[in-house]
């Protein structure tokens, strides 16, 4: 199975992991996990935003990998780009957690452009 397919699994799990550290607080109420007051400030708000963006980024990445592989793109190249996507998304989450907006935007752009490259890879193969 191509590495890019495993990256799909990683990309699907990453949003969940993005919010997980914010749930480790003693005042997190698992009976009300979506309480907007809990997620409104600071680290918690950034973690929730990173999670939301991860869920937003996943569909395009998933479609890009499927299209790239099924339409005859070079699997080795797609694997590399998928790894770049995951690496950039991890950096994106860490930048969100640590409130570093410019590097976060750069990581977002790298991930987005890698997904575009995967999607268009059959054209260049």
Image (cartoon, rainbow, N blue to C red):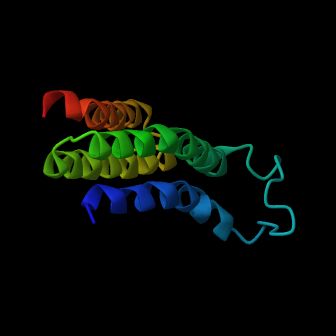
Across and down, in percent, residue 56 comes to 56, 39
6 vs 119: above or below:
below
Across and down, in percent, residue 12 comes to 50, 56
Side (left or right) of 2 relative to 21: left
- Quadrant location of residue 29? bottom right
Q: Which of 97 and 55 is in front in this view?
A: 55
Assign the C terminus to one quadrant of the image: top left
Residue in view at x 50 percent, y 49 percent = 97
Residue in view at x 64 percent, y 48 percent = 48
24 vs 67: above or below:
below
Side (left or right) of 33 relative to 77: right
74 vs 32: above or below:
above
- Quadrant location of residue 7? bottom left
Residue located farthest toward the front when viewing the structure as drawn: 71
Side (left or right) of 81 relative to 125: right
- Quadrant location of residue 42? top right
Across and down, in percent, residue 99 comes to 49, 41
Residue located farthest toward the right when viewing the structure as drawn: 31
Residue in view at x 32 percent, y 34 percent = 119
- Total label count? 0
Across and down, in percent, residue 112 comes to 37, 33
Q: Which of 21 and 33 is in front in this view?
A: 33
Assign the N terminus to one quadrant of the image: bottom left
Residue in view at x 53 percent, y 62 percent = 17
């Amino acid at each position: 199975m191509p590495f890019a397919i495993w990256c799909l699994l990683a990309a699907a799990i990453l949003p969940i992991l993005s919010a997980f550290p914010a749930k480790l607080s003693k005042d997190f109420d698992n009976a009300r996990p979506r309480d907007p007051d809990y997620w409104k400030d600071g680290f918690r708000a950034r973690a929730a935003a990173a999670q939301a963006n991860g869920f937003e980024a996943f569909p395009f990445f998933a479609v890009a990998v499927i299209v790239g592989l099924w339409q005859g793109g070079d699997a080795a190249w797609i694997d590399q780009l998928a790894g770049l996507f995951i690496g950039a998304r991890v950096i994106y989450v860490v930048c969100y957690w640590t409130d570093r907006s410019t590097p976060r935007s750069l990581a977002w752009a790298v991930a987005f452009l890698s997904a575009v490259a995967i999607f268009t890879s059959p054209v260049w193969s």
